[in-house]
Amino acid sequence: MRKAIVVQRNDPNADEAENERKLAELKELAHASDYTVVGSMVQSRYPDRKYQVGRGKVEELAELVEALEAEKVIFNNQLSTTQIYNISETCKCEVMDRFQLILEIFAARATTRRAKLQVELAKLQYELPKAKSIVSLLKKEERPGFMGLGGYEDSYEQDIKKRIVRIRTELMHSCKGSESLRTFRHERGFSLVALAGYTNAGKSTLFQLLVKEGTIVEDMLFTTLSPTTRSLTINQRKVLLTDTVGFIEDLPHWMVDAFRSTLDEIFLADIILLVVDMSDPVDVIRQKLAVSHDIFWKRTGGAAIVTALNKTDLIPDEQLQ
């Protein structure tokens, strides 16, 4: 296991409970990518242009990195190319933000051609706005491993744009294939049911129970990346049940767009089983339900949505009521 330190800059007026929940989720994400979180650092302030947190805090961070022998610093806040460069120069180790961490998890879990293309598309869309500053920083000092991107020439930005177009075209063709597959399955008498919801809500556990089959079930984010489909019979009715990739909070639009074709399995379903983690705070449950229904809105073709309240055993009866 690789050692990592997690860092979070909180806005001065942000809700304290929400800040704690976000930091806990970052630690879970780090665990899902096989990091051991050996330390954490939090600062309340408005963002610093050069370092995200204050200069003094970065110097403290550098001391902590050395003392704990950490290999990586992971920020919950989105970092600019310049911020990553400046922090890594001070701390003398690799630096990444939450979105790069999610991409690292996706890349490790992607097994199908489609999933790998989606990971590459998300990575390219993350890099595109940073392309010019990456090249200028690479020219300023020879840093071949900086941002994990290798060596580049001035054509780097154009190369990214061309590759994005090629990947989108290939994914669009695979989406058309999904529509044909849906028609074929209906013709064969199958109803299509999709398990949906936030990551770690317990979709894979429910999937395993319904199909009576061993699938990967871990208390970890993103154990399901490529959708898994199995057939079963319910009251003499043939059903194809699909376990889908979980939603995650605060994803930027470029990442949602990149993984949109993964959600096709949900949009093409006749019934959506929306799995909700009832052990979350009530305001978090409301927020996750609202975002989930917003994702389904106008895209599900009139599919019935059945909400499955999961993990009710983790809270007292009176709280559940």
Image: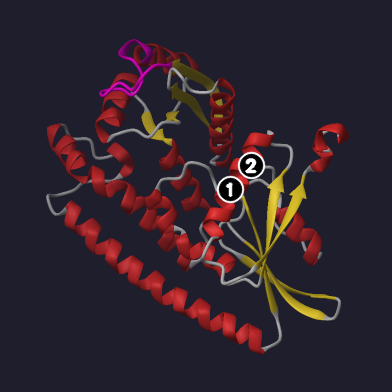
Specify whether residue 301 is painted magenta. Answer: no
Q: Quadrant of the C terminus?
A: top right
Residue type, label 1: Ala
**In the image, which disc is placed on residue 113?**
none
Q: Residue at x 56, y 27 (%)?
A: 18
Give the magenta range.
44-57
49 and 316: which is toward the camera: 316
**In the image, which disc is placed on residue 290?**
1
Q: Residue furthest bottom?
A: 187
Q: How is the image coloured?
A: secondary structure
Confirm or deny contact between disc 1 and disc 2 (CB under 8 A): yes
The answer to whether one can see residue 246 in this image is no
Specify whether residue 54 is painted magenta. Answer: yes
For the stretch drawn in magenta, what is the main secondary structure?
loop
- Horizontally, is 316 left or right of 190 in the view? right
Taking 243 as reference, is 309 above or below it?
A: above
Q: Position of residue 275 (x, y in %)?
A: 70, 53
Q: Residue at x 36, y 58 (%)?
A: 121
Q: CA distance from mark 1 to mark 2?
A: 6 Å
Residue type, label 2: Arg
Q: Few, some or many C-alpha atoms within 10 Å of disc 2 (few <14, some 14-19, many ≥20)?
A: few
Q: Quadrant of the N terminus?
A: top right
Q: Position of residue 299 (x, y in %)?
A: 52, 66
For label 2, the SS is: helix
42 and 32: which is toward the camera: 42
Q: Few, some or many C-alpha atoms within 10 Å of disc 1 (few <14, some 14-19, many ≥20)?
A: few
For label 1, the SS is: helix
Taking 145 as reference, is 109 above or below it?
A: below
Q: Which residue is mark 2?
A: 286
Q: Residue at x 46, y 58 (%)?
A: 259
- Horizontally, is 79 left or right of 318 in the view? left
The answer to whether one can see residue 69 in this image is yes
